[in-house]
Amino acid sequence: MTEADADTGEFIRWESGFRNWVTPDGSPGPCGEGGFKAEPGRYHLYVSYACPWAHRTLIFRALKGLEDAISVSVVHPLMPPESWVFGDYPGATPDQVHGFDTLHQLYAHSAPDFDGVVTVPVLYDTQRDVIVNNESAEIIRMLNSAFNAWGRADLDFYPAELHEEIDAVNALVYENVNNGVYRTGFATTQSAYEAAFDRLFETLDELEARLARQRYLVGDRITEADWRLFTTLVRFDPVYHGHFKCNQRRLVDYPNLWAYTREFYQVPDVAQTVNMDHIKRHYYGSHKQINPNGILPKGPALDFAAPHGRDRLGAGGKPDGEKGGT
Ligand SMILES: N[C@@H](CCC(=O)N[C@@H](CS)C(=O)NCC(=O)O)C(=O)O
């Protein structure tokens, strides 16, 4: 579902409705109610491989080694106007918890009077049988720190001493890049499109300059800020450049941003979270207002596995401070 402001034609993103937190002892998190104690096998993630917000959660689950602790259902890549459905498609799964046909059924099951937008990702509590949270920015923080007893406690993508700097970069990247591509692609007036387009490319220029000086967005280690940028960059040339008309430049025209994207793609366990077939099929096939015939472009040919050479910018490479990177 996409919504644009009737006067300005600007794309408006809705607020996520479920905001409880899983914590190590079940105490309340920064918002919402308590009662969601971290336990292996209790929580389930609903994702789409196509969705950049859901992709963040899949990456954190993989990097933190939580595959056995947190199970996953993957929706069908084609999204009808009434939101995501489950169905037979390579890489998609049934709803592994209830066997529902649509994600709307899950939302209605959890909150019968829910009337907001049905989105992925969803973190679901199979014990209390309710949605815990459907805001990716919060879900990745939980995966980063609440499940350390069952995962890689040594990896911290949101270290306390960097909170302020990470939050500042996140705000810039969210507004102008993560959401910026949507504001560009879903604008319904020329002026709204151009305003979002200009902000997007000004910010990409700024990030390109930053990444010419330093290996990662914040300091010399991989943080949450990098993963949040990565899921947009990996979709940039295959989808946003053409489908969303973000075409001042391609990602591959930015030497630093492109090498940076390859570095993150090559981090062990990340490539398996990138499903380019679901990504392209979803965008080009689901947004009939932008691509009425649903034609799926065959290109572009991109080599995410090509050497990135980012090691030349120095140490870092692993969030735990180990030298070298992949
Ligand atoms: N702020 C949310 C946004 C999630 C979101 O917008 N997901 C999209 C897919 S990329 C969705 O499910 N859209 C449903 C729809 O458009 O009906 C988050 O980061 O979790």
Image (cartoon, rainbow, N blue to C red):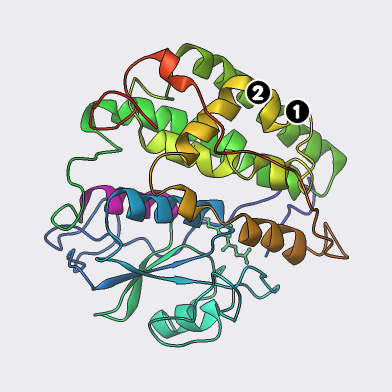
Q: Residue at x 48, y 34 (%)?
A: 171
Q: Where is residue 100 drawn, in percent x and y?
A: 49, 87
Q: Which mark is residue 36?
A: none
Is 35 located above or below residue 21 in the figure? below
Q: Which mark is residue 249?
A: 1
Is 302 located above or below residue 124 in the figure? above
Q: Where is residue 124 drawn, in percent x and y?
A: 35, 71
259 and 213: which is toward the camera: 259
Residue 193, picture quadrant: top right
Q: Per the image, is 20 magenta?
A: no
Question: Which label's residue is closer to the chain start, 1 or 2?
Answer: 1
Amino acid at dot 2: Tyr
Amino acid at dot 1: Arg
Assign the magenta stretch its main secondary structure. helix
Is 111 located above or below residue 193 in the figure? below
Q: Under tag 2, what secondary structure?
A: loop
Q: Residue at x 38, y 82 (%)?
A: 97
Q: Which residue is mark 2?
A: 254
136 and 62: which is toward the camera: 62
Q: Where is residue 66 drawn, in percent x and y?
A: 27, 58
Q: Where is residue 230 drawn, in percent x and y?
A: 51, 39
Q: Is disc 1 surrounded by few (<14), some (14 to 19) or many (20+) residues within 10 Å?
A: few
Q: Which residues are magenta?
A: 136-146
- Quadrant for the C terminus, please: top left
Q: Is residue 313 left or right of residue 183?
A: left
